[in-house]
Image (cartoon, grey):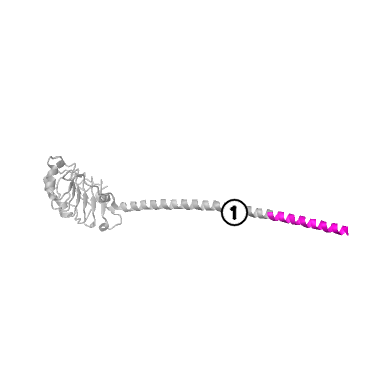
Amino acid sequence: MDMKKRVHLELKDRNPAEVCVLALDTCRSGNGEVDGVTEEFSGLEVLRMVNVGLTSLSKLPSLPKLHKLELSDNAICGGLEALAQKCPNLTHLDISGNGISDIAALEALKPLKKLKTLDASGCEVSARDDYRDGVFRLLPHVMYLDGYDRHDNKAPHSDNDQDDGAGPHGDAADEDDEDEDDAEDVSEEEEVGLSYLMKEGIQDDEDDGDYVEEEEEDDEDGDEEAVRGDKRKRDDDDDDDEDEDDQ
């Protein structure tokens, strides 16, 4: 898929100015140039163009809010001055796996005073013996080079790095996860409620059974009393008959 079409697909019905993260990895750039990304993406903060066949950054638009740019695995050999001109607020730049062969090419990044993290691993320049010392001297504001500081301490993991995989579907995915969690909670509540009702129903049935048994016992007691009453009446009648005979 070409880059312009991919941008359109990622954008969908949104206003370009509302997009904060744009991931265009593995699509194809037009003639090695940035295509489809325009200055209308004024609110863009994270841009990924990994392995898209870039050879030049001359058509990169002005993106004043961009702070993270990933350009790894392309064929960029120079022209990095475009970054200082169009993305002055960059703090993270990944140009690993490109064709940068000389430390002098990185001098174009000096105006990027906010740049704290730079990754040029996999470039020819990273094989030089003076690579790390040379870059830290050239760009003293850079704190981490290829994942390590000037004292070879590993860069701390940042949660902000997780947003580069977001894209336009990131929020929707989060919402889906939340919906699934809510559905699981509702299901558990329904199961507990059903279990409780079944238990209550069983208890009610048992109570009704006790009530019926009590009624039956009461009826039996009543019948016994009636029988005893009839017997007493017959006995009294017999006594009266005997008295009349005696007279």
Q: Tell me how many marks there are.
A: 1
Q: Amino acid at mark 1?
A: Asp
Q: Is residue 217 above or below residue 121?
A: below
Q: Is residue 155 above or below residue 211?
A: above
Kindly identify which residue carries mark 1: 208
Q: Position of residue 62 (x, y in %)?
A: 19, 56
Residue at 12% across, 44% down: 134
- Majority secondary structure in the magenta region: helix
Give the percent coordinates (x, y) of residue 192.
47, 51
- The magenta stretch spans residue 102: no
Q: Describe residue 81's horizontal placement relative to residue 43 as left or right.
A: left
| Residue 228 magenta-highlighted | yes
Q: Point out the stretch of residues depicted in magenta.
A: 221-247
**Which sits in the foreground, 202 or 43?**
202
Q: Counting other residues with Cα less than 10 Å from the Cα at mark 1, is it few (<14), some (14-19), or many (20 or more)?
A: few
Q: Quadrant of residue 121?
A: top left
